[in-house]
Image (cartoon, rainbow, N blue to C red):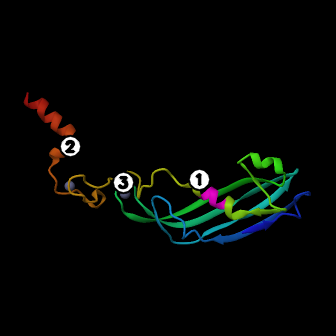
Amino acid sequence: MRLDLRGIINEAGTAPFDFETDLSGMSFDSIAGFLSPLRASGRVTNSAGVLTLTGKASVSLLCVCDRCGAEFRSDREIELNAVLSGELQDRENPDIYPLEDGWADLDEIVFTAFVFSLESKTLCREGCLGVCPGCGKNLNDGPCACKPEADSRLAVLKQLLSE
Ligand SMILES: [Zn+2]
Ligand SMILES: [Zn+2]
């Protein structure tokens, strides 16, 4: 969505926004699908000559656990905070979003915030046990039938005791 800020570029004021953007064509590591569009709402405020965007975005994701490979639903809330500027020289600063003829490209701002909110490791739960390297069973569903000798620390202990 493009937001018209021409009315508040040069004077104090607020421009609200509320829109959805479809990310289903995007592909990300650890995301199997989007269960909802990305919904964003908030406002851009001109305060003392600085245009600040604040708000929230939310989306439901179908994630893939990096450790056990299970798919799971994850509802995300993302804080939106950005500074916008109509000044051409600010295009040098990547933290400040430029305006185009007084319009802001909110899709870019929200999409950037979403990408930065993604964690480097996606886990289905804290302390996910992963899969057994021997038989491939998902250990979150319970222990597998593999022999405990697979535990190298135990093997070392046994060796120490037998000496
Ligand atoms: Zn997992
Ligand atoms: Zn196993």
- Tell me if the residue at label 3 has its CB under 8 Å from ligand 1: yes
Please give left or right for residue 28 compared with residue 45 in the image.
left
* Prevailing secondary structure of the magenta residues: helix
Vertical order, 107 against 143 (above or below): below
**Residue 160, magenta (yes or no):** no
Q: Residue at x 24, y 52 (%)?
A: 133
The quadrant of the rendered image in which ligand 1 is seen is bottom left
- Tell me if the residue at label 1 has its CB under 8 Å from ligand 1: no
Q: Determine the secondary structure under disc 2.
A: loop
Q: Residues within 10 Å of mark 1 (few under 14, many from 20)?
A: few
Q: Determine the secondary structure under disc 1.
A: helix
Q: Residue at x 73, y 57 (%)?
A: 54
Q: Which quarter of the figure has residue 123?
A: bottom left
- Dot 2 or dot 3: first in sequence order is 3
| Residue interval drawn in magenta | 110-114
Residue position marked by numbered label 3 in the rendering: 67
Residue 138, horizontal then vertical, whole percent: 28, 59
If the image is split into quadrants, where does the N terminus sit?
bottom right
Q: Determine the secondary structure under disc 3.
A: loop
- Please tell me whether mark 2 or mark 1 is closer to you in this view: 1
Residue position marked by numbered label 1 in the rendering: 116
Please give left or right for residue 7 compared with residue 84 in the image.
right
Q: Residues within 10 Å of mark 2 (few under 14, many from 20)?
A: few
Q: Nearer the viewer, residue 126 or 18?
A: 18
Residue 128, horizontal then vertical, whole percent: 36, 54
Q: How many numbered markers are drawn?
A: 3
If the image is split into quadrants, where does the C terminus sit?
top left
